[in-house]
Amino acid sequence: MATVPRDAGRAENPWLITVAVMAGTFMVVLDTTVVNVSLPHIAGSLSASIEESTWALTSYLAANAIVLPITGWLANYFGRRRLLLVAVVSFTAASFMCGLAPSLPILIFFRIIQGATGGVMQPLSQAIMLEAFPPHERGQAMALWGMGIVAAPIFGPVLGGWLTDSYSWRWIFYINIPIGVLSVVMIRAFIHDPHYIKRASARIDAWGIGLLAVGIGALQIALDKGQEEDWFSSDWITTLIVVAVVGLIAFVVRELVIRDPVVDLRVFRLRTYSAGVLLISLMGFVMYGTLVLHPVLLQTLLGYPPLQAGIAMAPRGIGTVLMMPLVGVLISRMDPRGLLAAGLLIGAGSLFWFGHLSLDAGFSNIVWPQFVQGIGFGLLFVPLTTVTMDPIPKERMGNATSLFNLLRNLGGSLGIATVETMLTRLQQVHTNVLGAHVDAYNLQTRTLLHGLAGRMVATGSDATTAHSRALGAMFGLVERQAAMLSFVDAFHLLGFIFLVITPLVLLMRRPRSRAESIAAAAE
């Protein structure tokens, strides 16, 4: 097993480095979804509405998105080890304060701190792991890292629901404390700054940081609140989107013309990296979109209680966890681009499989497509990360991983917003189409209406009330079928996206072989 030299002349086992950075990263990614199922309990406990309590999610995601792209610059300016330690300590302390929060504004304040410090940990941990292993062994490292990144959002709602039901919503924050303490101890013991981590310039690109914060923050809030506010019918959402577009365009222009940018966008000149970033953003779109579809489908249409819904969703995480180690072995023996293409096609197939669901779907109809989807996702992340980062020099790895993680998260936010909007709008369309076929001149309609009214009369209703209730019941049936069709359409769209982007794999270069990476290291 290769070892990583320390500045002091000793060497560290790269797997110890992996465990040191993965503990904090898993904690951060878990917190993006573990809060979702606890929002009603948080709202009730803090005397807030459900809509107000969603700011506990929005604030976290916005702060996370703002910090992600500047992590590489922060690491060079303050030192990677120091920055990582401050981030883990701050995140852990903020988690403790979130658990103690007596009001919603205080909870939101500490969620912002969580998001900002958590945004630092994701790209730093990925950059450290990529540098700790030689290129031909990075696949195995990314397999372990990917297990945490992909599995944490899947298991988060299950864990959050169990902790909330069994103890209190405050425990979804308290569980971070022992993980954070372990991470701090291991970072102090095993993480050290390489010689090329140094401050390139004493100047701080304040305008670049400001434009980035305004643009990314406005975009993240607009995506998270857009459907709730009915998008462009809301002046507030329209203003946010305009601010986001103007701010991000100004940011890109500034970063391309100044001497010492806070985010080095020139990395996109590498074709393999650009194609990989596009793929990870669309993968985030699909993965997070399905994370919205599945629990809503199971609980609102199929009548699953929260715990059983979590169990039904677990096979996707199981498939991913089982596949990741195998991919870590295969990636060193075959072209990872083939694994990536296979993952996209399997993921597309599982989504089209979900597109055949109906209101009569049984447990097995949910479990097996989930498991296959988990296998597909397990084939995606490791090869994509390995191929994308292969041409990146070590001294630019922090900047590259920051942008990589930012685009994945923004793709996920866009996927969630798109799916939520689709479900609402398409249900209205399907309700109108199906309702047009339910009329008094249709024999089947009259038969069903008379049957329902007869049952109402048998339970004690008078004829007029029974007829009115029967009409309401029929409309409910139409709405449920329309809702199911909207889910089917959403699954088809996500599957189609995976099919369409599969040819992008051809734009990426095959990563260096073991012999090539050893020769490069020797030079």
Image (spheres, rainbow, N blue to C red):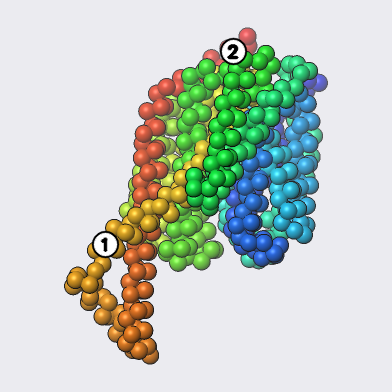
Query: Is residue 323 at all visible to an observer of this figure?
Result: no
The label number, if any, that marks residue 451 in the structure image = none
Instruction: Give, as a three-letter code, the residue at label 1.
Output: Ala
Front residue of 8 and 468: 468
Question: Please, is residue 98 above or below residue 248 in the view?
Answer: below
In this view, the mark in front (2 or 1): 1
Question: Please, is residue 100 above or below residue 120 in the view?
Answer: below
Callout 1 secondary element: loop
Question: Please, is residue 195 above or below residue 443 in the view?
Answer: above
Front residue of 110 and 505: 110
Quadrant position of residue 74: top right
Q: For the C terminus, which image quadrant?
A: top right
Residue at the spot of label 2: 520
Instruction: Please name the residue shown 69% across and 30% down the image.
Output: 210
Residue at the spot of label 1: 436
Mark earlier in primary sequence (2, 1): 1
Instruction: Give, as a three-letter code, the residue at label 2.
Output: Ala
Q: Residues within 10 Å of mark 1 (few under 14, many from 20)?
A: few
Q: Residue furthest front?
A: 235
Question: Is 350 displayed left or right of 244 in the figure?
Answer: left
